[in-house]
Image (tube, rainbow, N blue to C red):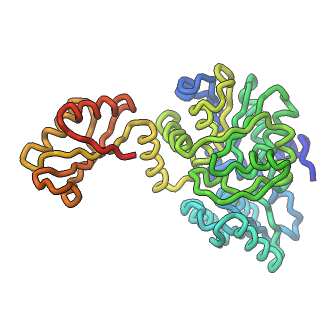
Amino acid sequence: MDVTLSDIRAARRRIAGGIIQSPCPESSPLSEITGARVFCKLDNFQRTGSFKERGARNALLRLPAARRKLGVVAASAGNHALGLAYHGKLLGIPVTVVMPDYAPLIKITTCQRLGADVIVQGRDFVEARAQADTLSAKHGYTYIHGFDHPDIIAGQGTMGLEILEQVRQADAIVCPVGGGGLIAGLSLAVKAVRPKVRVIGVESIATGNFTAALKAGKPVLGPRRPTLADGLATLTVGANAFALARAHVDEVVSVSEDAIALAILRMVELEKTVVEGAAATPLAAMMSGRLPGLAGQRVVLVVGGGNIDPAVLSRIIECGLVTDGRLTRFTARICDRPGGLARLTRVIAECGASVKDIAHDRAFSGSDVSAVHAVCTVETRDRAHIATLHRALKKNGFPLVVAK
């Protein structure tokens, strides 16, 4: 079943009463660090924190009355499930979601709070989908695919129409790619209305669904790999989504997990907004030099979701600080007598670094009982500052073992 610009425009009218037109402001700090004029399409501002509400509401409103009464089922790692749960509740449609075991806890508990029947089952999306299909056959539920259903693709495409109205002189739109539903709908809308605007997809190196499909000429099933961008970990791109996106997307690039962590940190620090890993990939691509051709151009970054577990966010921020050279750890050998630790901390302080934690390791410090290993976690400004600190410590007689 094809999706057309008319379908996307109809979806926009249909969902208007339940979906906000999310802001798309220009970001001065992100522009400064990327060398482009950056605008952020903040769909993490939707009620459930994700663009997935667009497609979910459109698909639910398209159901016949009999199907609405029976209810719907879906397999989802979180955001599609949240969108269905919320709009199903608003529209009085029962919703069941099957979530794989890697789904973030915040998405599971929020789905439950929104009234969905949540089943956590399956090591990956394929196993979760199999359970959803079983429930559909048993109870007569309508299965709504999270990224390949035509009504879902049309709903997600409404974001493209909004962007073109909000940033009228946009040169490029950079969009995350997982299952492909968002970039398929968005690229179709954008190219139909303003074909000169470049549409660029971004994947994690741990996912790569779209790239794999391009190489094979069709969607292929990939292995599950751990990734900060759990929203992209669908194992494959959708067949309908791939057919549409391949015809309209100009380029697809991949970014590292470290780059994603650093992008999440930059969004928190500079944009004052919390994003999940998938939503950080467009900024990660810009920051890591994957899109040098966009320098000086008007670039819209699709910020698709903000549903990240706070505990995971804390770990990611620390990883980002390490990648940024603002947090370092080393082991220094010091004299285990009064004044030994004071000498070490004095050198650290004189270099302008701040001690976050020090732990003494006596059991594994060797046979010299007069010496001890001090494991230090230190806050620094950047990697150059770390190098300066290391030189000062060695100059003052503190042999170092640096954590990798």
Quadrant of res 90? bottom right
Left or right relative to 238: residue 41: left
Instruction: Examine the rendered structure and indicate whether residue 62 appears above or below residue 346.
Output: below
**Rendered residue at 36%/46% (across/down):** 403
User: Count the marks: how many?
Assistant: 0
User: Among all residues in the image, which is located at the extreme right?
Assistant: 1
- Residue 160 in picture, x, y percent from top left: 77, 38
Relative image position of residue 227 (x, y in whole percent): 58, 53
Residue at position x 52%, y 43% in the image: 258
The percent coordinates of residue 367 (x first, y second) are 16, 57
Q: Which residue appears at 80% of the width and 78% of the height?
A: 139
Q: Is residue 228 visible?
A: yes
Asked if residue 86 can be seen in this view, the reply is: no
Residue 135 location in percent, x, y?
A: 77, 76
Residue projecting furthest to the bottom: 138
Determine whether, in the image, residue 368 is placed left or right of residue 304: left
Residue at the front extreme? 367
Q: Please tell me in which quadrant of the rendered image residue 197 appears.
A: top right
Q: Tell me the quarter of the picture where residue 111 sits.
A: bottom right
- Judged from this view, the residue extending furthest toward the top is 296
